[in-house]
Image: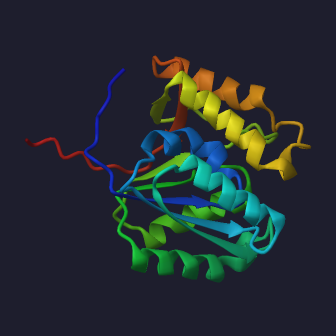
Amino acid sequence: MIGLTPGRLRRIVVLGAHCDDIAIGAGGTLLTLARPGLRVDALISSGGGTEREEEERSALAAFCPGADLDVTVLKTPDGRLPAHWDEVKNALEDLRSRTDPDLILAPRTGDAHQDHRGLAELVPTAFRGHLTLGYEIVKWDGDLETPTAYVPLRDELAGRKVELLQRHYASQRHRPWYDSEAFLGLARIRGIECQARYAEGFHVQKMRLQLEG
């Protein structure tokens, strides 16, 4: 398996269309990266002012222990992001004016859900020169594809991710796909694909490699 080890990350941006998207798609990666001195700016485009916002703030604090975390949750309706394009675009532009991240974690452009896909398409309009890893979200649409990048997860972090998902997002437990087997099962498959026990998969559309030195 070919791997590249980046330098120290100082600032990252994490984006989600819904509260729990970030944790489902990249929770293990956040647990891997989290440390004192890391700045994490999170923007979620729906769920503001509801119980889901409370869940999200609590969950992201647990997924980013020790990090300097800032969370913004917009109030656009679930399932209506295309109709609120300007509001989400403005929020992304505002975030860009406040940070210059080393890495962005966001939905992938091939996601079947219009909110996920719409947010993914907006990311490069605000963050044009930044490395963006598009995370995947398991759901009934069956839209998973083979990732182009992987983040291996230690056994304890894979287990921790699943534990935190179940603990913090009580409003989602009724969904038939929202269970530990689904989350850990996908992590095991992605681990097999990158010669690890567990992993999270990501999609990269454009990346610059500076190999000199």
Count of numbered circles on the image: 0
Estimate the x, y position of residue 61 in percent, counting from the top left: 59, 55
Whether residue 200 is visible to the viewer of this picture, yes or no, is: yes
**Toward the viewer: 142 or 160?**
160
In the picture, the quarter occupied by the N terminus is: top left
Residue at the image position 46 percent from the left and 34 percent from the top: 151
The answer to whether 39 appears left or right of 138 in the picture is left
The answer to whether 78 appears left or right of 59 in the picture is right
> Measured along the vertical axis of the image, is residue 14 above or below residue 201?
below
Residue at the image position 57 percent from the left and 60 percent from the top: 15
Whether residue 110 is visible to the viewer of this picture, yes or no, is: no
In the picture, the quarter occupied by the C terminus is: top left
**Toward the viewer: 111 or 165?**
165
Residue at the image position 81 percent from the left and 38 percent from the top: 178
Estimate the x, y position of residue 31 in percent, counting from the top left: 51, 41
Q: Quadrant of residue 167?
A: top right
> Measured along the vertical axis of the image, is residue 193 above or below residue 59?
above
Q: Quadrant of residue 156?
A: top right
The answer to whether 65 appears left or right of 172 in the picture is left
The answer to whether 140 appears left or right of 62 in the picture is right
In the rendered image, the residue lying farthest to the left is: 213
**Toward the viewer: 202 or 73?**
73
Q: How is the image coloured?
A: rainbow
Estimate the x, y position of residue 88 in percent, counting from the top left: 62, 76
Estimate the x, y position of residue 56 in percent, counting from the top left: 69, 58
